[in-house]
Amino acid sequence: MAELRGALIGCGFFAVNQMHAWRDIAGASIIAICDRDPERLRIVGDQFGIAKRYTDAAELFAGESLDFVDIATTAPSHRPLVEMAAAHRVPVICQKPFAPTLADAKAMVKACAEAGVPLMVHENFRWQSPIQAVRTVLDSGEIGTPFFGRISFRSAYDVFSGQPYLATGKRFIIEDLGIHILDIARFLLGDVSTITTRIARINPAIAGEDVATMLMDHKSGATSVVDCSYATKLATEPFPETLIEIDGSDGTIRLAQGYRLTVTGKSGTAVTDVSPPLLAWASRPWHNIQESVVAIQQHWVDCLAKGVQPATSGADNLKTFALVEAAYAGAASRQPVQLDASL
Ligand code: NAD
Ligand code: 89Y
């Protein structure tokens, strides 16, 4: 198959990882980039040797023949850009958070479905190799049927220096980071029927919540706790590790800090190191996230080749996004929120 010709829109902080990852992937390459900020366009264009540069996405779509577009801007621009891609019949990847509201996200899924173009949300955390290792253990049946999970992300890492907009929004940790952890809970334990949420803001220098604790009923019958914090100072900073506890009818899984996976099940106890590889262009501690960017982008290319829906399609991600909306609604009302009503 001929190499897919892609364009990347949004040449900011995180897009650099996506550009590196595209260079690692067989079967696709980025032939044009776009950013409304000429300085970001210059920096990324020069770093990755991309000659075709646009400051206006409409001009990019008009000027290039594309097999896909990778949108790496922040949420406010996602809907117009995805709808532009759909109008040009160009398959589209969109960064998380999918949109500012669930209504926008639904409209984007509808626009792409009506245009017949694939849509994947860049929901990469479930593609981290330690998380995939947990999924593999569940699939093996070693711990039987899961009845409890705790998916936990607690850190005091300074994310604001690289992403200053995170300090200014009314919403912070659930929308930015919790969205990944909620998606991991869905990935491991299935879809959710009810969520109960408590939030807090500990850091006085930011506008949104930096602590969230969520209790969920999964349709499988399992219960989970998803807890996130950017206000947790620990002896060894775990960023960006997601820690996992799953209890099943025949055993347990523990993914502990330092990427140590302990499985106690039908065959006894096994402890393995599931550290992600440090890719040539990656840097600690981000290497865990960076590796998952390659994995999800490779998945996109594979899905386009096979003509199948990506695991984190727009339609799938509506269920993760609905959890975010339900968490904020439940935090405000202090009441449990049913999920099916919003989808
Ligand atoms: P950023 O602000 O550094 O970069 C966004 C870039 O998009 C900017 O250069 C801006 O000029 C450009 N842009 C915005 N609107 C545009 C438009 N309409 N047309 C062209 N260019 C436009 O943001 P960032 O920190 O790189 O984050 C981007 C997205 O990536 C966010 O949604 C963030 O949540 C997400 N992110 C994801 C991960 C992950 O692991 N999946 C990690 C970090 C950030
Ligand atoms: O934006 C966030 C994300 O998606 O992963 C980590 C992060 O960069 C900061 O919370």
Image: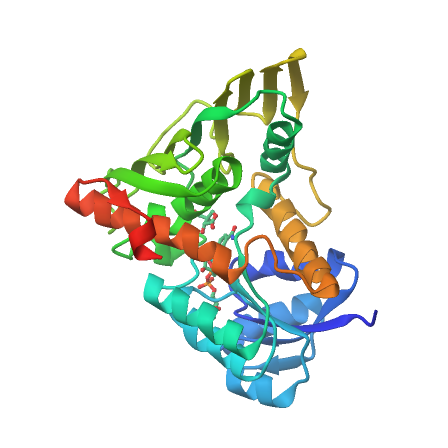
Colouring style: rainbow
Quadrant (top left/top right/bottom left/bottom right) for the C terminus: bottom left
Q: Residue at x 74, y 71 (%)?
A: 4
Q: Position of residue 165 (x, y in %)?
A: 36, 58
Q: Is residue 208 above or below residue 249?
A: below
**Near-viewer residue (50 or 1):** 1
Q: Position of residue 2 (x, y in %)?
A: 82, 72
Q: Residue at x 60, y 45 (%)?
A: 127
Number of callouts? 0
Can you tell which quarter of the image residue 32 is in? bottom right
Q: Residue at x 42, y 31 (%)?
A: 152
* Left or right placement of residue 154 versus residue 145 in this view: left
**Near-viewer residue (40 or 114):** 114
Q: Can residue 29 be seen here? A: yes
**Near-viewer residue (263 or 9):** 263
Q: Position of residue 42 (x, y in %)?
A: 59, 74
Residue with the most extreme top position: 268
Q: Can residue 161 be seen here? A: no
Can you tell which quarter of the image residue 64 is in? bottom right
Can you tell which quarter of the image residue 122 is in? bottom right
* Left or right placement of residue 28 versus residue 90 in this view: right
Q: Is residue 144 above or below residue 34?
A: above
Quadrant (top left/top right/bottom left/bottom right) for the N terminus: bottom right
Q: Is residue 287 above or below residue 263?
A: below
Q: Position of residue 143 (x, y in %)?
A: 58, 20
**Near-viewer residue (334 or 69):** 334
Q: Residue at x 37, y 29 (%)?
A: 233
Residue with the most extreme right position: 1
